[in-house]
Amino acid sequence: MKKKQASSVKERFLRYIGIETTSSAESEECPSAPGQLELGKLLRKELKEAGAENVVLTEKGYVYGHLPATAGLEKVPCFGLIAHMDTSDAASGKNVKPRSVKYTGKPIPLGKSGRVLGEKQFPELASLRGDTLLVTDGTTLLGADDKAGCAEIVAALERIVKEKIPHGPLSFAFTPDEEIGRGMDHFQPEKFGASFAFTVDGGAVDVFEWENFNAAEAVLSFQGIAVHPGSAKGKMVNALSLAWEFHSLLPADEVPEKTEKYEGFFFLHAVEGSSSQAKVRYLLRDHDASKFRARKKRVQDAVHALQKKYGKEAVSCRVEDQYCNMAVVLKKYPFLKTLAFSAMKKAFLSPRVEPIRGGTDGARLSCMGVPCPNLGTGGGNFHGEYEFVSVEKMEKSVEILINIVEGAVKKFAKTGKRRYSSSRG
């Protein structure tokens, strides 16, 4: 019988992006789109083929797998790796047509779309000269967020098993609906079984992320009074005008396109309606907890101002927290940063820390008792048609994951102590 050849991380990634997994906030199902179950079945199969045991796909679309420790290393704390299967609805994820390009620094035309991927608009591409980039045809996103993470985790597992790399107990999980904030809604930490974990859901592979936004969504409903515009004077109340007036009460410079690093924002995410009724959604984000509370209060103050002016029935508001800054938890476990930095240096990278201007499954999982910082996938320009991923950086990510596994053994194997484990033990 011919021995099955190992599958490269690139090959895995190309298989995964062939399945449409766009999540939908409008759906009440979990997962919110059937393609996520299809990818879950493929990941279940590939985890088993790579050597994982006790691999399951739950009815909610979560995939779990485990790799028992190398003999004698059972006392090393269980480390987990997590990626999400869904893609953002900000651009189509259907019929993705990837193209492989050896990047020289010249702008890359994205199919016949008229879009061009280049350093003028995306200067970070300069660091990838000489790499092989996988890009889109300009009509869909690519899916590197986070199918690159999925591919890298399975590829790392395959190498650990095939090369007999000594390791402690390892856990793997692939989650649905992360992009709509539901990735941890039905996650089962006890089934996952890890004391510590890393999400593989970032961009540059030399970046370690252990702090993220505090996040909330504000949903506002505006009730107008519809009257024929020909006889509207003194009678009409335009719901869309109310929404715009509300927006004018928020600081104009505190928006995503004018902020960076640790600066928070109010993001006008969606608007729908007519002169009669309108609904508006805002995303509120800030790393600092006190500033985050102030943002929520700013929204409520603006609502009260409009209610005072037009009546309570004119506007209503619901603000719901989505996730918190995982730094509150992770700063108690500095060895996770040391472990990741050592793994990156071993891969000949110069590691750096950056804040996440968003959130991950790891943010919620950290607050659930499993400390879980974030690592990069090698991709960029997520959530849009300009998305790309570097094949060489995907391979580097696999190397980093293996280095972390080896580093955990080096740190914990001699003492056998679990004093650094989470509250779940």
Image (cartoon, rainbow, N blue to C red):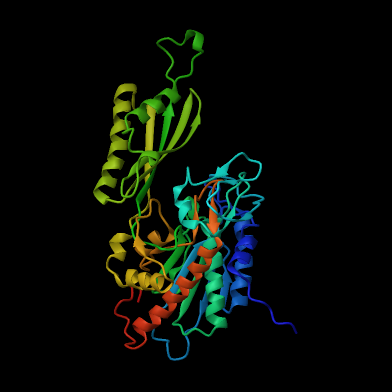
| Residue 366: x %, y % from top left | 36, 64
The residue drawn where x is 48% and y is 87% is: 70
Question: Toward the viewer: 318 or 216?
Answer: 216
Is 327 displayed left or right of 156 in the figure?
Answer: left
**Count of numbered circles on the image:** 0
| Residue 121: x %, y % from top left | 47, 43
Q: Which image quarter holds the C terminus?
A: bottom left
Compared with 112, 204 (above or below) is below
| Residue 10: x %, y % from top left | 60, 65
Question: Toward the viewer: 316 or 394?
Answer: 394
Is 251 displayed left or right of 3 in the figure?
Answer: left
Question: Toward the viewer: 245 or 382?
Answer: 382
Residue 40 in view here: no
Residue that extends furthest to the left in the rendered view of this protein: 290
Residue that extends furthest to the right in the rendered view of this protein: 1
Compared with 106, 187 (above or below) is below
Question: Toward the viewer: 75 or 109?
Answer: 109
Residue that extends furthest to the bottom in the rendered view of this protein: 72
The residue drawn where x is 46% and y is 67% is: 188
| Residue 15: x %, y % from top left | 65, 62
Residue 131 in view here: yes
Compared with 70, 322 (above or below) is above
Q: Which image quarter holds the N terminus?
A: bottom right
The residue drawn where x is 45% and y is 83% is: 167
Q: In which quarter of the image is residue 109?
A: top right
Compared with 296, 328 (above or below) is below
